[in-house]
Image (cartoon, rainbow, N blue to C red):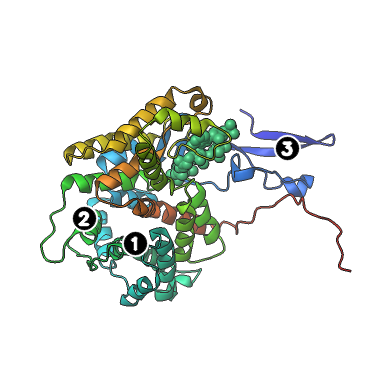
Amino acid sequence: MSTTAEIKIDGQTYEFPVITGTEGEKAIDISKLRDLTGHITLDFGYKNTGSTKSAITFLDGEQGVLKYRGYPIEELAEKASFLEVAYLLIYGELPSKETLDKFQKEISMHTLIHEDMKKFFDGYPSKSHPMAQLSSLVCSLSTFYPESLEPNQTEEEKNLTIIKMLAKMTTIVAFIYKKSLGHPLIYPKNKYDYITNYLWMTFGQRTEDFEPNPKVVSAMNKLLILHADHEQNCSTSTVRIVGSSDCNLYASISAGISALWGPLHGGANQAVIEMLEKIKADGGDTDKWIAKAKDKNDPFRMMGFGHRVYKNFDPRAKIIKKACDDILESLGINDPVLEIAKKLEQAALTDQYFIDRKLYPNVDFYSGIIYRALGFPSEMFTVLFALGRLPGWIAQWKEMRTNKEPIGRPRQVYVGDVDKHMK
Ligand code: SDX
């Protein structure tokens, strides 16, 4: 097994170390490439470029494998709670019952946000997108907790910032939703666990005691677990690069929220439902829309299909599709867009264009149908993606800071004007 790679430039051969990850992935370490050869690499979208070594999440796009800290996603989605998975991602091990209870209790003590944060809502236009609100509200946490700005927080101080981020995210997300409806805000209750507390603040009524539907709690747990981390995707890489400037956790997470918002990334779950609704309104002719997705002159893309890494089924999509069937059946909902989604999926899986490009349904294809069944408007879907992805962002930020990785600063190839002068 070769442990070096050779690059030949102008007749000279240069050797670079080949490193192998614990799951057998191979990388050429080019840290010294520019010093030795005067050359850099060029890789639009970093499709072939590793930015770090990480022990948090492993995925194999060809095999459709996803593991958090070595545990298969299928097992975690079936047997763990979201808070257990959050602890696993951030601290590296599944918590004992005592540790989990302590973690839950610490989070419960920090779910309130400063009353002055409610003033932000008065400034947003009534129909402003929840992702814009979420990004700015999360960043503003750093104004209420200025101690978080210290780059060299002690482990204890850093951990308190992490607890506050996890705890306050549910309240901020619930408040954004309630404000969008013009409903009174519902404050967190310490007696509830993480997911139930979130559902209480979102769907509970002030007057009567809240009885969560166990099927809804289970569906939310599963959905948030499936979204919890996904190695160096667009938004996680954003969190890491912002954090690499010694920027505080809140502002780094806020940057990740903004990156996730894009319809090619986390915004796809909202775009999928809007696409399905459009196809339904257009008479449900899935063949017509598949033809549009294949037409290079048509800007339409099949949202929820394709993935930078998965060139096989996204393992999360399989789990979500089954959860979708289960929750719709248990809630007695017959959603016509689900039938359109299944028709689209079947047609695409047998179409040569999709087969040749290895385009399969991804995590966003079915998640929006579940969120809608749970009563969320489509503008909230990406906010829910962010709620799920939060522990992964935190874990990746913490790993980067613990490993004292250098500030991220890619190079470029300049192709602009040369030798211009003022008259
Ligand atoms: C997420 O990275 C992650 O891990 C992300 C994520 C996570 O958990 O963090 O998994 C979450 O972001 C999932 C992806 C959600 N996005 C969408 O569903 C939007 C629709 N899909 C795409 O736009 C696209 O597939 C991407 C952005 C997801 C991936 O794009 P790539 O890897 O840059 O691939 P590409 O754009 O170069 O496409 C390769 C070919 C092209 O055709 P050719 O030029 O070779 O003829 O496939 C075509 C593309 O036109 N193609 C599609 C398509 N996706 C790719 N054609 C029609 N419909 C699509 N959805």
31 with respect to 390 (left or right) = right
| Residue bearing the label numbered 1 | 169
Which amino acid, by three-letter code, is at mark 2?
A: Thr
Q: 212 or 80: nearer the eye?
A: 212
> Which is more N-terminal, label 3 or label 2?
3
Which amino acid, by three-letter code, is at mark 1?
A: Met
Answer yes or no: is residue 71 visible: no
**Separation of residues labelled 3 and 1 (CA atoms):** 47 Å
Residue 289 location, x and y as percent?
45, 33
> Which is more N-terminal, label 1 or label 2?
1
- Which quadrant would residue 271 be assigned to in this image? top left
Secondary element under disc 1, as helix, strand or loop, is helix
**Separation of residues labelled 2 and 3 (CA atoms):** 56 Å
User: How many marks are shown on the rendered structure?
Assistant: 3
Q: 83 or 144: nearer the eye?
A: 144
Secondary element under disc 2, as helix, strand or loop, is helix
